[in-house]
Amino acid sequence: MKRIIITGALGQIGTELTDKLMDLYGVDNVLPTDVHKNTDNKLIADKIEILDVRDFERMDELVSEFQPDTILHMAALLSATCEKDPLLAWDINMNGLVNALEVARIHNLKFFTPSSIGSFGDSTPKKNTPQTTIQRPNTMYGVNKVSGELLCDYYYEKFGVDTRGVRFPGLISHIKEPGGGTTDYAVDIFFEAIKTGSYTCFLEEDTYLDMMYIDDAVDAIIQLMETDPSNLSIRNAFNITAISASPKLFYSEIKKHIPDFKVEYDVDPVRQKIADTWPESIDSSEAKKQWGFEPKYDLEKITKTMLDALKVKLK
Ligand code: VAH
């Protein structure tokens, strides 16, 4: 990668990904885009362009002007939001993806878009979920992610577009909070531990899901995109994860730092139903073998990093 355009640059991943890319490749070699310009990151604010990924002409115009060699397509609605308006989710998540793939094909760009553990369904093996296994999700988000994986592989095989992807677990960050995700509790719990000392969780205490700290997620995208393509026998998309954790596990780790921290449960049936169809733990051995994926943050390090950062951010 030398010159990169990013869609969804102000999202939970996009914000920190853009920042890291500007640091690594130079501010002038990164073009962040999103549907708004609201950011307190000055470097991003100076560069960002408005782009709704459903607008092919605008995307094509930005790429023709900026002349990138890579597009990182991060714009999408997350799982719980998708269930509130499935047809809007299909429009943004799928028509946006087709536009990004078409732009990559026409302009010969390297291409990345994330899939998710949400691409698995209730009939998928839940523990140590294999890289290749049954994927019959019954959520609009999951349908979008499986369709997206298949479409990205099609563009690789049919048109030779260099498409690559990963299946992200829940991502934990303190700079940009997620919005509308089933795993958002794993971010909210840290914010509330510092803000109020108590948290009401919308998932059951023993709901185990794969999770990862945002720095490991950003590093994984860059590492995969910089890998020699001859090393890759899989394109879309690699299982990656750092930990398998539950609300109860996060609670007990946070209590080591904040002894009076309290958690109650008020389960959201929609998000619990989604979470119950997702794996408890996935096998990320192919990512390790093919491009050296190795997360640096375990539960202990995630907890200390989040609490230390939020004590400063929220004081
Ligand atoms: C969501 N954070 O909850 C996203 C993610 C694995 C979960 O895809 O929808």
Image (cartoon, grey):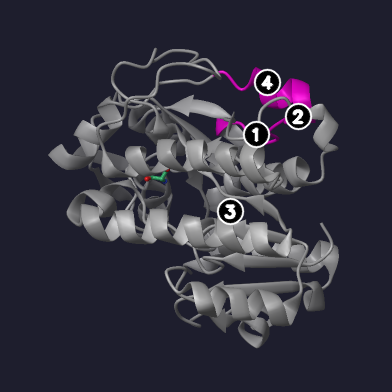
Q: Quarter of the image holding residue 293? A: top right
From the top left corner, tell me how far across and down residue 147 is, in percent. 42, 39
Residue beneath disc 4: 286
Mark 4 belongs to which amino acid? Glu
Q: Are marks 1 and 2 in contact (CB under 8 Å)?
A: yes
Q: Residue furthest bottom?
A: 46
Within 10 Å of disc 2 (Cα), the crowding (few <14, some 14-19, many 20+) is: some
Q: In the image, 120: left or right of 11? A: left
- Tell me if the residue at label 2 has its CB under 8 Å from ligand 1: no
Query: Callout 3: helix, strand or loop?
Result: helix
Mark found first going from the N terminus, 3 or 2: 2
Mark found first going from the N terminus, 4 or 2: 2
Residue beneath disc 1: 235
Within 10 Å of disc 1 (Cα), the crowding (few <14, some 14-19, many 20+) is: some
Work out how far the residue at label 3 is from the one at label 2, CA to CA, in angstroms: 38 Å
Residue beneath disc 2: 232
Which residue does the image show at 74% across and 49% down from the upper left? 222
Residue beneath disc 3: 308
Asked whether the viewer can see residue 266, the reply is: no
Mark found first going from the N terminus, 3 or 4: 4
From the top left corner, tell me how far across and down residue 9 is, in percent. 56, 67
Mark 3 belongs to which amino acid? Asp
Query: Callout 2: helix, strand or loop?
Result: loop
Within 10 Å of disc 4 (Cα), the crowding (few <14, some 14-19, many 20+) is: some
Q: Which residues are magenta?
A: 283-299
From the top left corner, tell me how far across and down residue 274 is, in percent. 25, 35
